[in-house]
Image (spheres, rainbow, N blue to C red):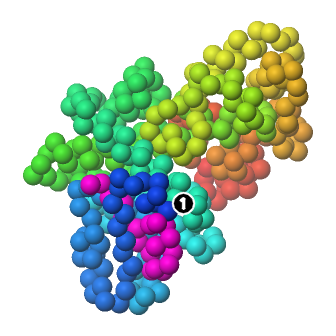
Amino acid sequence: MRSILLIDDTKAAIDQLATSLGEVLPEVEIRKWVPTQADVDARAAFDSMIDEETTLVITDFDLTSQGQTGLFGASVVAWCQQAGIPVGDYSRKLDSLPKAPELFELRVPSDPDAATAYIAGVFRGFQDISDALKVSDKLFEMRSPAAVLANILGQPEIESQLALYAVRIGSASGALMDRVMEKPSHLLEAKRRMLAYIVGHLLLNILRFPGPILSVRALKAYVASDEADAADVIGLFGSARYQGPFRDLEQYFWLSGVDMVLEELVKAVDYETETSGELYRRALENRLSRPLTRHACNRCDGKNGGFFCPFTERTVCVRGDCSVGSNSWIPQGARLCRIERDFFDEWSPILGL
């Protein structure tokens, strides 16, 4: 039976989360570890809680309240990366963890209800990918994780787009490279687990930085409206709905499908617009026979748009005073991402953006 390991030094918190997950994932074994002073060898205790069926590990950041001094979520994350097990961490202490996750580290919401939904969505996504890899050994013959992912998604033609997100995977984790250089006794199963680990994180990164797949927030930016999640708007893009792994995390849409819908809607309007975002919003308004709420931008009063800043999570446009183009902080394939100008000007001298 596949399992999820929960780690927290507060028993009430871990029991609550385990109960909630058991209700939404009844087919999954929910394991719990509350580190205490009695765990003389924390690493050995952790190793005893995982096996080949462990699909996901979730850990609190601070694990020291029961006397296990020096044990933090960062250690658990490192152990999971060495084992090739997806891991997410959280903290109930405000701002004790960065909001942005690393490539091979997931950031779990601290709110119990949101955490349950997120963990279940991530588990099912990795499960979907693992199951797909068991269906056909031909996936192992493909030349890259991007090729494998494109075929799992049923869209082999977008391999080149997905590959632009994968250019730094090899250098993102020293633990990953250590595993690649190992000679496991059960080679095929070890390769399957590693490939599922890599492909799953690659897809999560694609979902985080809009390109071929858009979240609702990115869709709002693309059509320059803060009302793009309204039922009548979403209804227009029903044919573009994404149904692949991690679909339960939130609503996603294929950019190609969205563009097909917009292409038809734009034919019915004759407007002079400054940006594509404004054009798309006007086309939607024409189709729905009502105005759409504009996004909050003090530079254009919500008129323009078309792009999403993944750092400020705001709608931006191509105007020079609004945003700058992609760089080393944004995957090359994230064609709908630009960096908000104010953020860029403030942090680029320090961070070298």
Q: Amino acid at mark 1?
A: Ala
Of residues 239 and 214, the one nearer the viewer is 239
Residue 252 shown left or right of residue 299 in the figure: left
Residue 327 in the image: x percent, y percent?
59, 41
Q: Is residue 314 left or right of residue 168?
A: right
Magenta segment = 1-19
Residue at 36% across, 27% down? 151
Q: Position of residue 111 (x, y in %)?
A: 60, 65
Side (left or right) of 38 relative to 232 = left
Residue at horizontal 73 percent and vertical 45 percent from the top: 314
Q: Can you say whether 120 is above or below 41 in the image?
A: above
Q: Residue at x 30, y 39 (%)?
A: 131
- Secondary structure of residue under mark 1: helix
Image position of 175 with respect to 314: above or below: below
Quick check: can you spot residue 283? Answer: yes
The residue where tag 1 is placed is 115
Residue 145 drawn at (x, y percent): 34, 36
Q: Measured from the top left, where is residue 118 in percent x and y?
A: 52, 54
Look at the picture and state if 337 lies above or below 52: above
